[in-house]
Amino acid sequence: MELKDTILQHYREQTSDVIADVRQDALNTFNQIGFPTIKHEEWKYTNLKQSLTKPYAIQPAATLSKAAIQEVLDTLPKGIFLVFVNGIFQPELSDKNLQGAEVNSFAEKVDVVQRYFGKNLPFTDSMQSLNIAFAQQGTFIRIPKNVSIEAPLFCVFLTDTQTENVFVQPSLFILLEDGAQATIAESYHTIGTNTSFTNLFSHILLQKDAYLDAYKIQNDVVSAVQINTTQLVHESKCTSHTTTITLGGGITRNNLSISLQSEHNEAYLNGLYVTQGTMHVDNHTLVDHAMPNCYSNELYKGILNDTSSGVFNGKIWVRKDAQKTNAFQSNKNVLMSKEASVNTKPQLEIFADDVKCSHGATTGQLDEQALYYLRARGIGEESAKKLLVHAFAFDVVDKIKNSVIKEYLIEALEAKL
Amino acid sequence: MKRSMLSIKNLQARIEEKEILRGINLEVKPGEVHAIMGPNGSGKSTLASVLSGREDYEVTGGDVTFNGKDLLELSPEDRAREGIFLAFQYPVEIPGVSTINFMKTAVNEVREYRGQDPLDAVSFLKLMKEKMKLVEIDESLLKRALNEGFSGGEKKRNEIFQMAMLEPKLAILDETDSGLDIDALRIVANGVNKLKSKDNAVIVVTHYQRLLDYIVPDYVHVLYKGRIVKSGTKELALELEEKGYDWIKAEADAVV
């Protein structure tokens, strides 16, 4: 049976009535569009065909032992751990002291979830719709009004592929109420050698004056395929820093859309991808400036080795009402081998007339002049290259706000460079 | 008589299809200062680059030995580790690498090559402070990204600082005077003079005589069309300053 049919059958078999209307709508959308193919403009350079023709167990029940999970947690920076196994939140395996945050299933908070989840978003995509269609077991994270949480809330996604290929769809709704502040990180871990296919969707809503520092740390095994969609909505006077670091995984597609729906919002988007082997990383970002006086600044950098490939597609919309917008975007890539490739496409669509916007994309090799200069001082070719690659990655790493995560990422990066 | 430190015999080199060096002969002994002068396009900077191992140039003939070793066989980094230092005409800007970090890597790789233990942080800092004073460079500059946004004078001073840190046997200054005002020139030249000893040598590549007022050469060579067409003492530099290069060109062209 085709994966699409298997999934549709699953939908028919489930009986949950949690956010049933939203899910049914989403299913209809998915049904119409189907899985993305390279014929879809937004998926031109990321081919899921091979990954989608495999047989998968759809979100099977969790089986990982506590010890196996602890082993993964021990490698991560200190934080408040929220453990997800095969896409589903596991309260009994997670930290109990949430320092003021609240974590519930969608079913437990159906009213709030019903009101916001999956609504008023600037774009839809069939993978996002597919996730929403099965979001009945989703997780709702709430940071109440004026609560500030020091330690990072660390969502750890584990997928058990020891016996079979596994398809999982974690759904998150994260609400930072007025004046709330939090650091939220995600990391992804496949346990086993079979393929894990993760289709993650998180909808984050920042209410007035909220502050979010968010991280995606992707350092999974090559048998991991991940579609990771985040829709981050700023109501007003909010600030967000998003850092998307991809160092591992087989195929990774990150959709990050940031919607600035009222005045005086600030969004900082940082990304770094370091690829080797046959890895493929695709970062699609969208910053939607809907209202005046907002600021966005985006910097994504890529270092591509071996036969790996990368995609950057960064869209900035400045709508008619969004006067006095400041929006900046930069994507820079270094190809470390002749076989590595990257497709980069900055897109600026401006409908207001009093704005400051810029974008730029570069792709090249390490600077030969710089390499010679370093070698002429007695630095060997390999260390000289390393120094230059470090220097290239440095400004993204330098922007990381959380010192514990920064330290962790520097170490993980070090191992890849 | 002292042995040659650097011995260049009939050196020929080209870039792509263009012959630039057409048979250079030069002997440099420890303690000597040689000036290489010549009109634009004569091959001065090419000679400096070829000696430091720049790979854009293809050596098509001749030999270069440095302290008995076949220099042309060595990679740029090994030449530096053997004690050759090129002060660049256009020092490269490298964002994201501080001079301090860069120098620490360089000093320790050179030490490793020479079988010495790496310097620990304290000893490195001590060495750095000492050399900073010597070449009159400010620490704040060294903490910044290498040459990024530096003025012309700051870049050249940074070159001399690096030279002080690496203590080369042979320093090649490639048009170090270009783009410097007189004060910067004096500081740079002072730095070079303080580093001079009976055991090391300096090759000063320059278009103008004025740097040689501060770094006084033992020998002056005039390069023209890829050959040394005249050699003399520092008086030759003064003569060139006064009369220009045309008479040398005429003399050389008459011979060929």
Image (tube, rainbow, N blue to C red):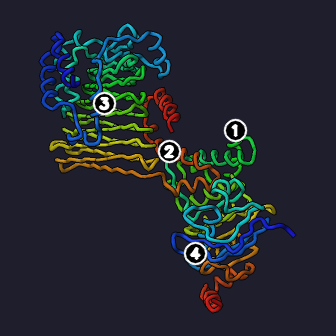
Chain holding disc 3: A
Where in the figure is residue A373, as x and y percent of width and height? 57, 56
Question: Both on one chain, marks 1 and 2?
Answer: no
- Which residue shows up at 17% across the image and 25% down it? A119
Can residue A322 be seen here?
A: yes
Mark 1 crowd level (few <14, some 14–19, many ≥20, 10 Å Cα): few
Where in the figure is residue B188, as x and y percent of width and height? 65, 63
Tag of residue A344: none
- The span from disc 4 to disc 2 (Cα, nearest Å) is 34 Å
B221 lies above or below A40: below
Can residue A304 be seen here?
A: no
Question: Both on one chain, marks 4 and 1?
Answer: yes
Q: Quadrant of residue B101?
A: top right
Mark 3 crowd level (few <14, some 14–19, many ≥20, 10 Å Cα): some
Chain holding disc 4: B
Q: Secondary structure at mark 4?
A: strand
Residue linked to disc 1: B120
Q: Secondary structure at mark 1?
A: loop
Residue linked to disc 2: A389
Q: Earlier in the sequence, mark 2 or mark 3?
A: 3
Tag of residue A51: 3
Tag of residue B20: 4
Q: Nearer the viewer, mark 2 or mark 3?
A: 3
Where in the figure is residue B177, as x and y percent of width and height? 60, 69
Chain holding disc 1: B
Question: Both on one chain, marks 3 and 1?
Answer: no
For the N terminus of chain A, which image quadrant? top left
Residue type at the position of mark 2 = Val
- Which residue shows up at 16% across the image and 10% down it? A15
